[in-house]
Amino acid sequence: MTALSMSVVVDVLDHAGYRCQCHGECGGAHSRGNGRCPISSGTRRHRLVVAPANPTLSATAAAHLPASELRAWCTACLLDAERLTRHHAPAAVEPDLFEGNAA
Ligand SMILES: [Zn+2]
Ligand SMILES: [Zn+2]
C-alpha cells in the first residue's frame, strides 16, 4: 500500500461515507448502486482502500496527494480501473507519428 498518513485515509473514507467511490471508472455500470459502486466497508468480504483518483499514479506520488485527489475504492474496482486507465493512456513516445513531416 501507499505511505498515506492515517488522518488522510480517514478523511477520504469519511467523505466517501465508507463506500467505494467508483462511478464506472472500473468499466462497470454499477446499476445496482445507481451508477456508483454499492460496496461499502461493511459489505462482507470486501475491503476499501484509499488510492488516487488516477489509479496509475505510483505509491510515492500518491503519498503527496491531498485528500481531494484521493478516493475510496473497493479492491475490485481499483484493479479494474487501473487496468483500464493504463490501457487508455496515450503512449509517452510515438516517434513514428512525426516521421512523415520531417521533410
Ligand atoms: Zn467498487
Ligand atoms: Zn467500479
Image: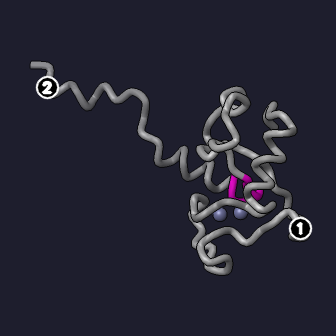
Eyeballing the image, is 15 above or below 92? below
- Report which residue position mark 1 lands on: 42
Identity of the residue furthest to the bottom in this view: 32
Indicate the position of residue 22 as horizontal and vertical percent values.
Answer: 64, 60
For numbered disc 1, what is the local secondary structure?
loop
* CA–CA distance in space, label 1 to label 2: 57 Å
Indicate the position of residue 87 as horizontal and vertical percent values.
Answer: 51, 47
**Residue 77 part of the magenta segment:** yes
The coloring applied to the image is: one colour
User: Residue at the spot x=81%, y=56% of the render?
Assistant: 48
User: Split into 4 quadrants, where in the image is the C terminus?
Assistant: top left
Instruction: Please say whether residue 75 is visible from this viewpoint.
Output: no
Eyeballing the image, is 7 above or below 83? above
- The span shown in magenta is 72-78
User: Residue at the spot x=83%, y=34% of the render?
Assistant: 5
Eyeballing the image, is 1 above or below 21? above
Tell which of 90 and 100 is nearer to you. Answer: 90
- Report which residue position mark 2 lands on: 101
